[in-house]
Image (cartoon, grey):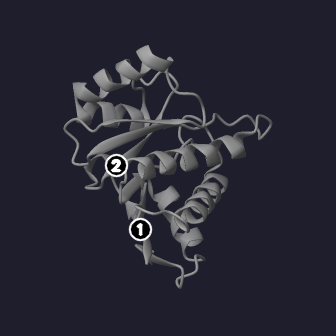
Amino acid sequence: MKTLRLIQGDITIQKVDAIVNAANTSLLGGGGVDGAIHRKGGSQILEDCQKIRARQGGCAVGQAVITSAGTLPSRFVIHTVGPTWHDGQDDENELLKNAYLNSLKLAEKHQLATVAFPNISTGVYHFPKHQAAKIAIKAVIEYMQDAESLAEINFVCFDLENFKIYRQQLAEVDQNQFQVLGI
């Protein structure tokens, strides 16, 4: 049975195959989780991101790319760019869903079993937290039903507010379909 796990804490210390970075389109680091991953992961992550930039010019909103994890305990970092909230007028829901789905597709392509997600777009990008959690959980559940290598997805909430939102929404997941831990 596949597992969904809820964790309140720091995504940079998760021992999983890949952590997901809520990156910006430049892939050069920034604030929030992006800055923390670049700082704690060291220069290798930035060097890998610079190679991707040279090859394709960054990462578009809703897309994902993968790099080494530098000095982080995970093996890889999947960088995805979530949308900035503009009152739902710029297809933000679909772009956020794509950020999750494209991250999962990349994990499957690399035959990864465990992936940890932060709360994409809910910080400086101002996506409404309840709505973002609903989109994230739905996208992950839909994708995981047919996933081959992926066995466990961790939702890592840095702040208590997101943790409580995810706990409430994960409590509604069919326990016959997924093992849900941390709620």
Residue at the spot 34% in from the left edge and 49% down from the top edge: 18
| Residue position marked by numbered label 2 in the rendering | 18
Residue 37: x and y in percent read: 32, 37
| Rendered image quadrant of residue 34 | top left
- 69 vs 56, left or right, is left
Amino acid under disc 2? Ala
- 85 vs 8, left or right, is right
- 92 vs 181, left or right, is right
Residue at the spot 22% in from the left edge and 35% down from the top edge: 70
Q: Residues within 10 Å of mark 2 (few under 14, many from 20)?
A: many
- Tell me if residue 158 can be seen: no
Total count of labels = 2
Residue 95: x and y in percent read: 66, 40
Residue 152: x and y in percent read: 40, 65
Amino acid under disc 1? Arg
- Against 128, residue 31 (above or below) is above
Q: Are marks 2 and 1 in contact (CB under 8 Å)?
A: no
| Residue position marked by numbered label 1 in the rendering | 5
**Between residues 126 and 57, which one lies in front from this camera angle?**
57
- 152 vs 71, left or right, is right
- Against 107, residue 173 (above or below) is below
- Against 26, residue 45 (above or below) is below
Q: CA distance from mark 2 to mark 1?
A: 14 Å
Residue at the spot 59% in from the left edge and 35% down from the top edge: 125
Residue 182: x and y in percent read: 40, 72
Which residue sits furthest bottom? 176
